Amino acid sequence: MDPLLWLGILAVLLIIEAATVGLVTVWFAGGALAAAIASGAGAGAGTQWLLFLAVSLVLLFFTRPLAVRYMKRGIPRTNVNSLIGKKAVVIQKIDNLSQTGQVRINDIEWMARTESDGETIQEESVVEIEAVRGVKLIVKKCKEEL
């Protein structure tokens, strides 16, 4: 195959990556670059395809986890998301079926619910915040008290 064809594939893959910014095609762009270099060096079509696949897979499996971890590191947690994993005190019995429940954390009162409808948590219990859904905190009872 012609090196220009591989460079064209490389350009298309980079344009797709720039449009999605999802770390989807950049790994295959690296494979296309390796295949373009091999094509320019006179390698056969089979070798070019094998090199394209091998380099793409190596980049995908070995560098993607590092890149994803690096990209997520810069995402700041919002005030609400920073509550996840923290402990709060129940100030009104949490009962999903009765649609009751409030907790206090950082001197702010929040509506609270449990993940399962059959579970209730009594007042003065310590809970851990698992998630935020709209204006409600999803909590679970802690084994340890504050």
Image (spheres, grey):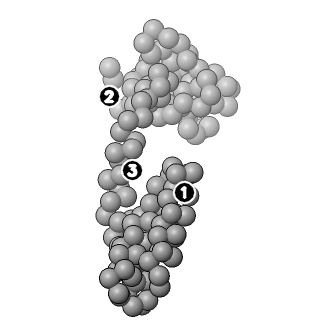
* Amino acid beneath label 3: Val
- Vertical placement of 32 versus 119: above or below? below
Image coordinates of residue 97 in percent, x first then y, are: 67, 31
Query: Cα distance, mark 3 to mark 1?
Result: 19 Å
- Vertical placement of 34 versus 139: above or below? below
* Amino acid beneath label 2: Glu
In the depicted view, which residue is nearer to us: 130 or 56?
56
Mark 3 or 2, nearer chain start? 3
The residue wearing badge 3 is 68
Mark 3 or 1, nearer chain start? 1
Of helix, strand and loop, which one carries label 1? Answer: helix
Residue displayed at 58% across by 40% down: 116
Q: Residues within 10 Å of mark 2 (few under 14, many from 20)?
A: few
- Vertical placement of 29 versus 75: above or below? below
* Amino acid beneath label 1: Ile
Which of the 4 quarters of the picture holds residue 132?
Answer: top right
Mark 2 or 1, nearer chain start? 1
| Drawn side of residue 94 relative to residue 43, left or right | right
Which of the 4 quarters of the picture holds residue 29?
Answer: bottom left
Q: Is residue 25 visible?
A: yes
Residue displayed at 49% across by 59% down: 14
The residue wearing badge 1 is 15
Circle nearer the viewer, 2 or 1: 1
Of helix, strand and loop, which one carries label 2? Answer: loop
The residue wearing badge 2 is 144
Image coordinates of residue 47 in percent, x first then y, are: 37, 88
